[in-house]
Structures are given as C-alpha cells and as structure tokens.
Amino acid sequence: MHKIGITQRLVKEENYDEIRDSLDIRWQELLSSMSLTAIPIPLNIDMSSYDSLSLDGMLLTGGNDLTSQSDNLLSRLRDKHEKTCIKYAIDNSIPIFGVCRGMQIIAEYFGSTLKKVEGHIGSRHKIASLNEHKYKEHINKMGNVNSYHAYGIDILGNGLNTVGICPDDEVIEAIMHKEYKIFGQMWHPERESPFEQNNCELISSFFNA
C-alpha cells in the first residue's frame, strides 16, 4: 500500500492543559478504500524521521484557521508545522495534496492572499473545472461539493494555476502547481457518505495508487 503522510487538526484540551493532534477517523476509511495508508505527522517531530519510510505522498488536512485569518497559538503552531511539511515534501519530490485549510496553506506558501467569502460555510455548491489539466474530467463529473470555509483565495501566487471554481461566485475551489506535483481542493472528501467516486479517483490518480 502507498504510504501517505497526513497532518492533523490541533485541539486545545483545557481540562488537561494539553494541545492534541486530532484526526477524523473518516480519513483512514477514505484512504484505505484507495489502498492508501495514512502515516500521521505530529507537531514538533523531526521530519528526517520520515526519511526511511519513503513516503509516497503528503496530505494536508482541514481544521484550524490560518494565522492570517485568526492569529492564535494553534494557528501559528500549525502554520509553521505544515510549511515545514511542504518544504520537506518538495525537497524530497513527494506529491502534496491539500484539503480546505491544506489548500489555503499551500496557496499562502506560494505567495497567495486570502479574503473573506460568503455562503461557503455548511453548504453545497456546484463545482466547475477551469483550464486544461489532468483531473478536469474528475472535477466536472462531481457536479457539486460540500463547503466549510469562510475564506477563499484573493490573489493567486506565482507558480499556481486555478483548476476549479464555484461557478456561482467564481471563488477558487481547486489549484495546482505549475512545476511541482501539488494539488489543492477546498471541499472535504472524507465528509461525504458514501465517499464520492470521482473525487476518490482523482486522489488515487494523484498518488498513483
């Protein structure tokens, strides 16, 4: 099975004065359905610890705002951690797939700016592919996607292409890097029940599973 390094939401547990890594169990269910194995990447770990694992991919998950959206301890810790993960993946030619916050941190890493958007929290909307790219057919076949984000891309950074939008308001919903194997999407594949076949095929194809 392909080994996918996966980042996690940070949760402050006030009763125990702990900051915890937390991952929705549906991620393992989703990845297992595609013969992918999730390898959690906890905060503060030395990324060189993963050298011997020869990761086949990196998955940046949702949860927690970026520091640019909400300047708090959890956001700052996770931003620093995931930027380290992105650099490690690029330096080691590891494909990177970002979901929701994961796409946003990828966008910011390459110089994008974000803005507040309306109507994208706890809703569904249409999705449309933009420009020519490898996953165009998969996106177009989805029809509509879930949405749980208050911020979207304002100015897209250099090196990135828009490959998916919400046609209702043209909010950017999917991006790809022009040089590196990096893809980001704003909707959550793990929150669909049953899992959306076309999105599974997109993710599986991306990781060459």
Image (cartoon, rainbow, N blue to C red):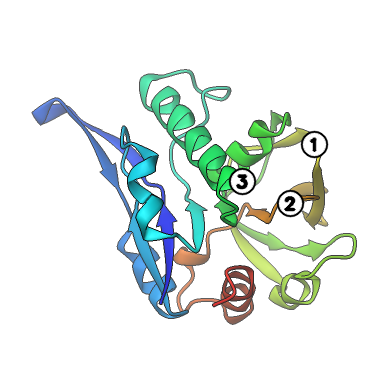
Q: Are marks 1 and 2 in contact (CB under 8 Å)?
A: yes
Residue 203 seen in render: yes
Residue 147 seen in render: no
Going from N to C along the chain, the mark reached first, 2 or 3, is 3
Where is residue 3? Give x, y as percent: 41, 66
Q: Observer-nearest residue: 85 or 140? A: 85
49 horizontally vs 166: left or right: left
Q: In this figure, which residue is indicated by the disc labeled 1?
A: 156
Q: Observer-nearest residue: 36 or 101? A: 36
Q: Residue at x 10, y 29 (%)?
A: 15
Mark number for residue 133? none
- Identify residue type, mark 1: Leu
Q: CA distance from mark 1 to mark 2?
A: 9 Å
Q: Secondary structure at mark 3?
A: helix
The answer to whether residue 192 is above or below residue 154 is: below
95 horizontally vs 134: left or right: left
Q: CA distance from mark 3 to mark 1?
A: 12 Å
The quadrant of the image that shows the N terminus is bottom left
Q: Are marks 2 and 3 in contact (CB under 8 Å)?
A: yes
Total labels drawn: 3
Going from N to C along the chain, the mark reached first, 1 or 2, is 1
- Identify residue type, mark 2: Ile
Question: Could you classify mark 3 by the number of other residues whose Cα lies within 10 Å: few (under 14), some (14-19), or many (20 or more)?
Answer: many
In the picture as drawn, the residue positioned furthest to the left comes out as: 16
Where is residue 86? Give x, y as percent: 55, 41
Q: In this figure, which residue is indicated by the disc labeled 3?
A: 103
In the picture as drawn, the residue positioned furthest to the right comes out as: 131
Mark number for residue 175? 2
74 horizontally vs 183: left or right: left
Q: Secondary structure at mark 2?
A: strand
198 horizontally vs 193: left or right: right
Q: CA distance from mark 2 to mark 3?
A: 8 Å
